[in-house]
Image: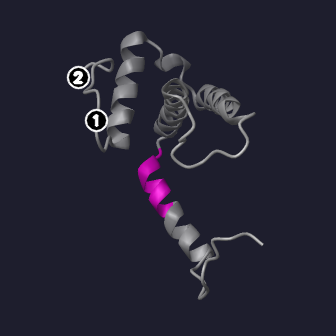
Amino acid sequence: MERSDEFPRKTKDVSLQELRDRLAEFARVRGWEQYHSPRNLLLALVGEVGELSEIFQWKGEVARGLPNWTAADKTHLEEELSDVLLYLVQLADVCGLDLGQAALSKIIKNAQKYPIANQTISTTFN
């Protein structure tokens, strides 16, 4: 297995399993597993969501693709989104859950709960 700190710069289609495995190895070699209880990981996740929220706090509405953001702002956003994702993956792992399968199941449930209506979708707001 590759070390957690080594990766191709532009990896495409990274799986949740690969992230889970790398995170588990990262924690194991540092002796951090003992601190990664569901509660601790959840609290860390909430903290990271707060940091992510701060990025958008005073920006108002933001256009898709972030056309008016600097490269540094986008990098900061990538880092905070990654922190949230990584804690979420770790939390699911220590809880013994298959996050990918759970997400797919949730999409199916949402499709049943919110069926497609026979109407056109308006692109304007009234």
The picture places residue 3, in percent across and down from the top left corner, at 27, 18
Please state if 102 lies on the left or on the right of 46 as rendered. Answer: left
Residue placed most toward the observer, 13 or 57:
57
Q: Quadrant of residue 35?
A: top right
Residue placed most toward the observer, 45 or 119:
119
Q: Which amino acid does label 2 sit on?
A: Glu
The single residue placed furthest to the left in the displayed view is 1
- Residue hosting label 2: 2
**Bounds of the magenta segment:** 97-105
The single residue placed furthest to the front in the displayed view is 68
Tell which tag, 2 or 1, sits nearer the viewer.
1
The picture places residue 88, in percent across and down from the top left corner, at 53, 37
- Residue hosting label 1: 11
Q: Is the magenta stretch mostly helix, strand or loop?
A: helix
Residue in the picture at 54% in, 72% down: 111
Secondary structure, mark 1, is: loop
Q: How crowded is mark 1: few (under 14 residues within 10 Å), some or many (20 or more)?
A: few
The picture places residue 11, in percent across and down from the top left corner, at 28, 35
